[in-house]
């Protein structure tokens, strides 16, 4: 069948193979799987029973690695809103926001964001990744400077790479290092400092109360990614910037719907008077299809419910503190000395031991994230736990017991 994909064959390995650059990772993966460990990056959830329980490998499993912080994925009001929108508006828009892809539900979701954050402007992107790349690559251009924490998320780095600004990293959460970078920049140059409320690998919060005023002192605009804190941290769930009293000094707040909101999508909110021009100049907004109306309905409903979720926030903090203390008492090394978010990272000796521990926990009936270099800071291997507001006290007790048994079985404690 000449001219079809049927006669395509895998080429023999040759010099200049574009896959050669991935060989170290291929070798690491093959070495790991040769030990008999289940591939930790190909787990399939056969059935999801609730925000905290799923069937994995035929077994009922507690979920402790889903970022479903507020447990909104099965909320009856959220599901009902999505079903209604699916019936009324169909499965998708087949167009971008600047053409035929803006429905009333997209505007309503942006209104919900403005209500939630108390801002004048809100833009919804098709993913959180696109929100970062779309804003960052557009807002800082040639002759401008981006100053960012070295542990920033991949989407932030990719946004920098897609733009034409000068990128200046500084040591993680180091206020003095940030000021040194700011001092060296040309006076009058455009400056954008990018920070995260909570860093996803170790679950540590940024000292925004000191960093944001410092940025303003040197004439820099500030973008804070609150992906892992929105909904949970702060009196109204607006994130670390709110909790530390500097929300009104931030120029842009970016986040995602794929965590506390419980669906998919990304957003940027701002009070900048010229912000609306971003709808015409951000390529990540202009040149991609908009989210399905059903997703917008679920997101808007979830956002408005999270506004009144004070009890959930209190319960999640209680469980985070309890799990952090219990794992520390068992002898595990954690990413933070005190709990700073709903992320609790357990540091493993190496990737092999980490994979063994991950598999032992899965056999116990517990799913966590196995995070490895290069995604992790300082080459660490982590078992990353993400608590949900709907984890019961009894489930947390079970989780602690599972960690103890798996830790002893693998020699990690």
Image (cartoon, rainbow, N blue to C red):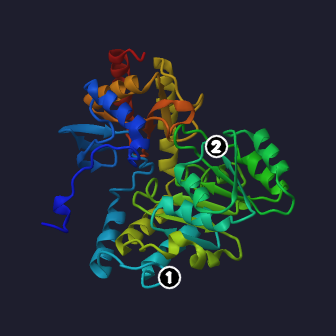
In the image, is residue 55 above or below residue 381? Answer: below
The vertical placement of 139 against 233, above or below, is: below
Tell whether 141 sits left or right of 7. Answer: right
Find the residue positioned furthest to the right.
187
In three-dimensional space, the C-alpha distance between marks 1 and 2, rounded to whole angstroms, equals 34 Å
- Give yes or no for contact between labels 1 and 2 (Cβ–Cβ under 8 Å): no
Q: Which residue is mark 1?
A: 98
- Mark 1: few, some, or many residues within 10 Å (few <14, many ≥20)? some
Residue in view at x 50 percent, y 63 percent? 130
Judged from the image, the secondary structure of the residue bearing numbered disc 2 is loop
Quadrant in which the C terminus is drawn? top left
Residue 226 visible in rendering: no
Q: Point out the image quarter for the N terminus.
A: bottom left
User: Closer to the N terminus: mark 1 or mark 2?
Assistant: 1
Residue occupying the far left of the picture: 1
Task: Residue 150: give its label.
Answer: 2
Residue at the spot 64% in from the left edge and 43% down from the top edge: 150
The location of residue 212, given as percent across then percent down, is 75, 52
- Left or right: residue 282 compared with residue 90: right
| Label 2 crowd (10 A; few <14 / some 14-19 / many >=20) | some
Horizontal and vertical percent for residue 101? 42, 80
């Amino acid at each position: 069948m000449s001219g079809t994909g049927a006669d395509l064959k895998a080429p023999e390995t040759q010099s200049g193979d574009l896959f050669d650059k991935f060989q170290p990772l291929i070798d690491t993966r093959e070495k790991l799987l040769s030990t008999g460990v289940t591939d930790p990056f190909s787990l399939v959830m056969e059935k999801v029973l609730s925000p905290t329980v799923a069937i994995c490998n035929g077994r009922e499993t507690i979920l402790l690695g889903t970022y479903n912080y507020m447990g909104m994925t099965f909320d009856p009001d959220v599901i009902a809103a999505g079903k209604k929108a699916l019936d009324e508006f169909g499965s998708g828009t087949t167009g971008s926001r600047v053409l035929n892809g803006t429905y009333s539900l997209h505007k309503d979701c942006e209104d919900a964001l403005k209500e939630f954050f108390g801002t004048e402007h809100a833009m919804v992107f098709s993913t959180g990744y696109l929100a970062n790349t779309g804003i960052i690559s557009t807002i800082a251009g040639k002759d401008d400077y981006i100053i960012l924490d070295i542990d920033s998320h991949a989407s932030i780095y990719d946004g920098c790479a897609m733009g034409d600004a000068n990128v200046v990293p500084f040591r993680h959460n180091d206020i003095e290092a940030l000021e040194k970078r700011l001092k060296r920049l040309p006076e009058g140059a455009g400056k954008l400092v990018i920070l995260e409320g909570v860093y996803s690998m170790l679950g540590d919060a940024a000292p925004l109360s000191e960093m944001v005023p410092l940025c303003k002192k040197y004439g820099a605009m500030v973008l804070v990614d609150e992906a892992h804190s929105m909904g949970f941290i702060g009196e109204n769930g607006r994130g670390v910037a709110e909790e530390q009293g500097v929300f009104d000094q931030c120029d842009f707040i970016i986040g995602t719907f794929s965590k506390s909101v419980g669906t998919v999508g990304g957003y940027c909110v701002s009070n900048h008077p010229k912000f609306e021009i971003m709808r015409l100049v951000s390529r990540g907004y202009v040149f991609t299809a908009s989210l399905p109306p059903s997703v917008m309905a679920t997101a808007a409903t979830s956002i408005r419910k999270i506004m009144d979720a004070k009890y959930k926030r209190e319960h999640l903090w209680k469980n985070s503190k309890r799990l952090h203390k219990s794992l520390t008492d068992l002898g595990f090394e954690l990413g933070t000395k005190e709990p700073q978010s709903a992320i609790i990272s357990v540091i493993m000796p190496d990737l092999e031991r980490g994979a063994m521990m991950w598999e032992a926990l899965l056999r116990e009936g517990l799913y966590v994230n196995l995070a490895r270099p290069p995604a992790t800071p300082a080459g660490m291997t982590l078992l990353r736990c993400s608590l949900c507001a709907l984890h019961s006290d009894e489930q947390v007790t079970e989780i602690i017991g599972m960690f103890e048994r798996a830790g002893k079985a693998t020699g990690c404690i």
